[in-house]
Image (cartoon, grey):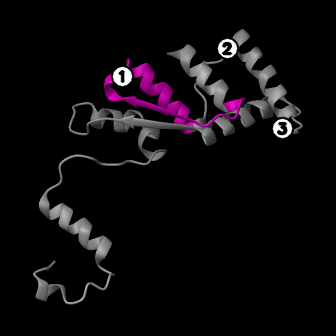
Amino acid sequence: FNEDLRGVMRRVGIDGEKICFIFDEANVLGSGFLEAMNALLASGEVPGLFDGDDYTSLMSACRDSAARDGVIIDSEEELWRRFTGIVQRNLHVVFTMNPSGGEWKNRSTTSPALFNRCVVDWFGSWSPKAMAEVGKEFTIRLDMGDAESVGGSW
């Protein structure tokens, strides 16, 4: 997984590719996987992912990328900030999970970026009352004529 993630981050942060990374809770390999995703969403980096030769190679590629874009960067720290900023802008993560599962509460507290750095879409069964309320909110300002006389009511 780490090798794949390094590859995706290089494609996004150096080549400027826009990527949507989609995974389901069934693909979660363990708590380390969620920690990596949480860190990536929160800061654009995964601590320890690029070490040693990987980091040296990344910084060289970042320097080349910045030069290609006409950006003058003085330090590795600036290169790293540029890289993580591009990653945050161009890498989009879609994580699907079942909120009725037993891990929902645990994941929401231990991985806050999965919730506060993402758009949460709720899918599933809705009660008739909930669907009527949503419909009402979206149509309340529309002129529907005399809805009561044609059988409609809220």
Q: Nearer the viewer, residue 39 or 119?
A: 119
Establish if 139 lies above or below 24.
below
Q: Residues within 10 Å of mark 3 (few under 14, many from 20)?
A: few
Name the image quarter holding residue 50: top right
The amino acid type, in three-letter code, at marker 3 is Asp
Give the image quarter of residue 152: bottom left
SS for callout 3: loop
Which residue is drawn at the image coordinates 87% and 32% (left, top)? 67
Image-quadrant location for residue 49: top right
Q: Position of residue 31 (x, y in %)?
A: 39, 21
Q: Which residues are magenta?
A: 13-42
> Residue at label 1?
27
Query: Residue 39 magenta-drawn?
Result: yes
In primary-sequence order, the first of circles 2 and 1 is 1
- Does residue 125 sit above or below 59 in this rendering? below
Secondary structure beneath label 2:
loop
The amino acid beneath tag 2 is: Asp
Q: Is residue 47 visible?
A: no
Give the labeled residue for mark 2: 51
For the question of whether residue 50 can be seen, the reply is yes
Q: Look at mark 3 in the image and give the residue it sits on.
A: 69
Q: Is residue 120 left or right of residue 76?
A: left
Query: Helix, strand, or loop for circle 1?
Result: helix
Picture coordinates of residue 48 (x, y %)? Answer: 61, 18
User: Who comes first in sequence, dot 3 or dot 2?
Assistant: 2
